[in-house]
Amino acid sequence: MPKLRADKISVFFLGLVPLFWLSWRAFEGRLTANPIEFITHYTGDWTLRLVIIGLFITPLRKILKLPNLIRFRRMIGLFAFFYGCLHFLTWIWLDKFFDPGEMWADIVKRRYITVGMAGFLMLIPLAITSTKGWIRRLGGKRWQLLHRLVYFIAIAGVIHYWWLVKSDIRLPALYGLFVATLLAWRIRQWMRASTPSTLQKAPQAVAR
Ligand code: HEM
């Protein structure tokens, strides 16, 4: 059995903090006058935050020269999916009472729900294929290509949030800025990796 290190266990408990905090507030009856809205917003916020935190891992490990950060990426991604499921569950259960007609009407009528749903549906294959077995089955290249969906999920999350706010767009704009910066960094890395000069330098880099 693989050894679970203390740092991974700490990240696991950190990921549960938002859930504990929400449960504590519920226990104390402090979910505001509109608990459904509060839970929907809270779980939506954490889904988007965790998607973005997961996207920060690769740049941070390169910039800070901390390659081991990669060990936490899968767990962060799975926590994003977990809070996404809670967010989705709040909507279908507490908001729509499992009524497929109501749900469908919302999906086609409200564009922010349409894009949110697209984001959630894209999270599912990433969660399923997050295991080592799936990396082996798909092959590294195909797996990486599939997992680039995470950028579309982040963009969908930002658009979803932007479209649902009534007037104050500061927070969705801030999340949007993070996602745009991360995407720009990534595009720069891909372009660098495919330029002939970098390709020529590659064997040296491996030798070092
Ligand atoms: C399953 C599909 C989804 C549905 C049905 C859904 C539905 C909702 C609803 C009804 C709200 C509250 C709107 C309001 O009260 O005006 C909301 C808020 C939010 N959702 Fe979603 N959502 C979905 C997926 C997602 C995903 C995938 C993300 C993130 C990647 C996300 C992030 C957010 C955020 C950040 C908020 C706003 C939180 C705030 O105001 O503090 N949602 N969503």
Image (cartoon, grey):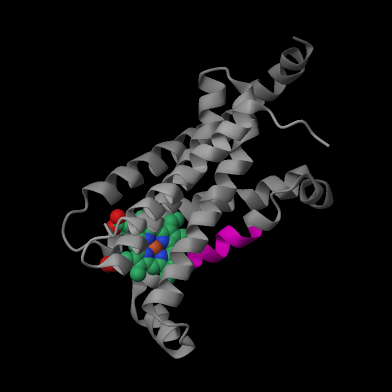
Q: Quadrant of ligand 1?
A: bottom left
Q: Quadrant of residue 129?
A: bottom right
Quarter of the C terminus within the rendering: top right
Residue 169 spot, x, y in % from top left: 21, 53
Residue at the outermost front position: 28
- Compared to 40, does 133 lie above or below? above
In terms of depth relative to the viewer, which is nearer, 116 or 155? 116
Residue appearing at x 54%, y 55% in the figure:
82
Residue 179 seen: yes
Please tell me whether residue 4 belongs to the stretch shown in magenta: no
Q: Main secondary structure of the magenta part?
A: helix
Identify the residue at image location x=41%, y=78%: 107
Rendering coords of residue 36 (x, y %): 32, 68
Q: Could you say where residue 143 lies in the image, as x and y percent from the top left?
A: 72, 48
Q: Which residues are magenta?
A: 116-125
Write the residue at 22% across / 47% down: 170
Residue located at (51% from left, 32% from top) = 188
Q: Is residue 19 above or below residue 112?
A: above
Q: Quadrant of residue 10?
A: top right
